[in-house]
């Protein structure tokens, strides 16, 4: 049976916090989740993003053949189109989502996994608090 995650994306460094609540199916890849997050968080869609699971020391990015291999002593790297979210979201409480565009300062989000549900809520709406 398909499960859903209820996530809360909180923009880091803002007081009062700016956040969005998101419902996602458990059978999507990280590249699909990045697309949804970019649309919901009102960013242009691109492949320049990163998911960081600090406690596991894992980072998930979109690799391209022309890109150099990523080496980091502290983190393991995974390819977003090949990695499904359920492998991580069932076992973690939060992760960081960040954009990696032109080496400039971009907003980061702490995304909290609030709960797992057996079905999507009847009335799913995008909740936003500013």
Image (cartoon, grey):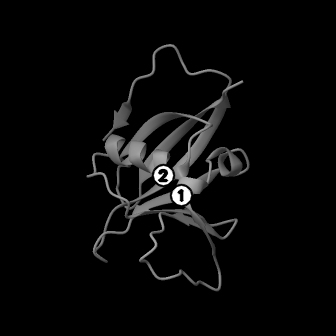
Q: CA distance from mark 2 to mark 1?
A: 5 Å
Q: Is residue 122 left or right of residue 15?
A: right
Rendered view: 11 above or below 50: above
* Local SS, label 2: helix
Q: Nearer the viewer, residue 50 or 32?
A: 32
**Horizontal and vertical percent for residue 52?**
55, 64
**Horizontal and vertical percent for residue 56?**
70, 65
The residue at 38%/29% (across/down) is 126
Q: Quadrant of the N terminus?
A: top right
Rendered view: 104 above or below 45: below
Q: Nearer the viewer, residue 35 or 119?
A: 35
* Local SS, label 1: helix
Q: Is residue 113 left or right of residue 20?
A: right
Dot 2 corresponds to which residue?
31
The residue at 34%/61% (across/down) is 107
**Horizontal and vertical percent for residue 100?**
37, 69
Q: Nearer the viewer, residue 81 or 112?
A: 81
Residue 80's disc is 1
Badge 1: residue crowd in 10 Å (few <14, some 14–19, many ≥20): many
Give the residue at the far front of this rendering: 65
Pointers 2 and 1 in contact (CB under 8 A)?
Answer: yes
């Amino acid at each position: 049976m398909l499960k859903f995650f209820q996530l809360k994306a909180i923009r880091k460094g803002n007081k009062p916090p700016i956040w969005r609540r998101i419902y996602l199916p458990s059978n999507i890849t990280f590249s699909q989740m990045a697309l949804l997050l970019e649309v919901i968080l009102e960013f242009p869609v691109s492949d320049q993003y990163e998911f960081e699971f600090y406690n596991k020391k894992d980072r998930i990015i979109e690799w391209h053949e022309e890109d150099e291999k990523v080496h980091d002593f502290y983190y393991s790297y995974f390819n977003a189109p090949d990695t499904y979210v359920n492998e991580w979201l069932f076992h973690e409480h939060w992760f960081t989502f960040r954009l990696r565009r032109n080496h400039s300062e971009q907003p980061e989000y702490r995304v909290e996994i609030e709960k797992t549900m057996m079905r999507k809520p009847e009335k799913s709406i995008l909740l936003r608090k500013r």
